[in-house]
Image: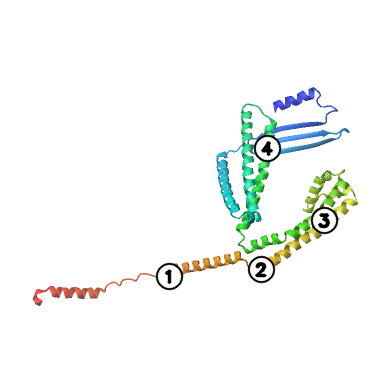
């Protein structure tokens, strides 16, 4: 911080900021030891020829130093082993039936899992190498913003790849749960409603882009949320989710602002959304009426067989528990006395 303050004082003393300055960049590296977080801060001020100033900033916080690095390395090695196993498995399936393999959706999903899995591992180790380089320079007292910025960028790419990898890996559970009637109906609904849903999305996209251009042309000069096509599209999507500033639209244009808001909400929320749900529900109703497939019949057979086996085991165990050993009757004392008297009489010599 002392070097940054000295540099700022030097720039101010030597008049680096004057009327011909067009942009000022402020780049900071902050570290919170309690949370073990690095923050890479970029602040930009841009000046136009008319004197207007536009500010923008970016703050990215990441945990670049891992305390449990050995455990994380072991888990990533385990992930690499699983990915290699999937590579061998998918290679055997491909060489066995290449055409059928490429025509199946689940095959492409498996390939996506493998590609994004190895991609995330490669990006992670690359980012870790940059972090080790920054650690060496930090120990020597040299702090280079570009190296930290590069490490943060690679970690952001790693986060995106990891998110896609986890998404595809989670979708594989649909195939594992295909023996369930509800999951089967859902998968078949998605499969059969693909064409009508795609046609619906084309129409909805055209309508959404029309409102996007309308918002940009009407409010692009006055409102920050509609300054370009991308921000206008983002504002309309959040408006559809219920997050909007109606007063800002009224300030933008007191007639066209409310008119655009109500027409957009009615068209998107009540008409297009109802059409989308109708398409899905019709296909789902057709699939739920005929759930008799080979997979579901196999599940019913396995379930019945398991139930019969469990019942037989219960009956066998209950029968064993009911069987009790026979009690040996204790001899009567009177009979024992009589038997003893009889033996004494036999041993008596006078009896002879």
User: Up-down: is 189 above or below 73?
Assistant: below
Q: CA distance from mark 2 to mark 3?
A: 37 Å
User: Gap in Å between the C-alphas at discs 4 and 1?
Assistant: 69 Å
Residue bearing the label numbered 3: 265
Q: To which residue does mark 4 refer?
A: 152
Residue under the image location 62 percent in, 35 percent down: 129
Looking at the figure, which quarter contains the C terminus?
Answer: bottom left
Residue named by callout 2: 290
Give the quarter of the image for residue 136. top right
Which residue is at the front of the view, 194 or 49?
A: 194
Residue found at x 19% / y 73%: 340
Nearest to N terminus: mark 2 or mark 3? 3
Mark 1: secondary structure = helix
Label 2 vs label 1, nearer the camera: 2
* Quadrant the N terminus occupies: top right
Q: Which residue is mark 1?
A: 319
| Residue contact at pointers 2 and 3, CB within 8 angstroms | no
Vertical placement of residue 49 versus 87, above or below: above
Q: Give the residue furthest to the right.
A: 255
Image coordinates of residue 243 in percent, x first then y, are: 78, 51
| SS of the residue under disc 4 | helix
Mark in front: 4 vs 1 = 4
Q: Residues within 10 Å of mark 1 (few under 14, many from 20)?
A: few
Q: Earlier in the sequence, mark 1 or mark 3?
A: 3
Residue 34 visible at all = no
Q: Mark 4 vs mark 1: which is more N-terminal? A: 4
Q: Furthest-bottom residue in view?
A: 352
Between residue 56 and residue 233, name the one nearer to us.
233
Instruction: Work out whether residue 174 or residue 149 is closer to the camera in this orientation and state it.
Output: 174
Per the model, the C-alpha gap separating discs 3 and 4 is: 39 Å
Are the residues tagged 1 and 3 within 8 Å (C-beta)? Answer: no
């Amino acid at each position: 911080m002392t070097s940054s303050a000295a540099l700022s004082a030097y720039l101010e003393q030597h008049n680096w900021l004057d009327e011909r300055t067009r942009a000022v960049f402020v780049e900071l590296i902050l570290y919170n030891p309690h949370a073990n977080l690095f923050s890479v801060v970029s602040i930009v001020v841009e000046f136009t020829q008319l004197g207007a100033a536009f500010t923008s900033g970016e703050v990215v916080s990441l945990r670049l130093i891992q305390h449990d690095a050995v455990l994380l390395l072991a888990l990533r090695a385990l992930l690499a082993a699983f990915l290699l196993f999937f590579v061998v498995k998918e290679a055997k399936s491909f060489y066995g039936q290449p055409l059928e393999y490429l025509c199946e959706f689940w095959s492409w999903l498996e390939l996506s899992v493998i590609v994004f899995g190895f991609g995330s591992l490669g990006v992670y180790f690359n980012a870790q190498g940059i972090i080790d380089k920054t650690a060496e320079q930090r120990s020597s007292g040299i702090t280079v913003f570009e190296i930290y910025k590069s490490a943060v960028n690679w970690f952001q790419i790693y986060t995106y790849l990891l998110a896609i990898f986890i998404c595809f890996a989670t979708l594989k559970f649909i195939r594992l749960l295909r023996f369930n009637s509800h999951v089967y109906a859902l998968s078949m609904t998605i499969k059969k409603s693909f064409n009508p849903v795609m046609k619906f999305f084309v129409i909805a996209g055209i309508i959404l882009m029309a409102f996007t251009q309308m918002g940009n042309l009407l409010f692009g000069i006055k409102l920050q949320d509609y300054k370009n096509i991308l921000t206008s599209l983002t504002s309309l999507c959040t408006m559809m989710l219920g997050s909007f500033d109606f007063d800002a639209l009224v300030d933008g244009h007191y007639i066209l602002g409310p008119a655009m808001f109500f027409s957009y909400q009615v068209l998107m929320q009540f008409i297009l959304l109802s059409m989308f749900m109708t398409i899905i529900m019709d296909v789902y109703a057709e699939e739920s009426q005929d759930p008799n497939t080979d997979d579901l019949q196999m599940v019913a057979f396995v379930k019945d067989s398991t139930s019969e086996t469990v019942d037989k085991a219960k009956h066998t165990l209950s029968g064993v528990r009911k069987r009790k050993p026979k009690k040996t009757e204790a001899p009567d004392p009177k009979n024992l006395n009589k038997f003893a008297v009889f033996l004494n009489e036999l041993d008596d010599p006078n009896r002879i």
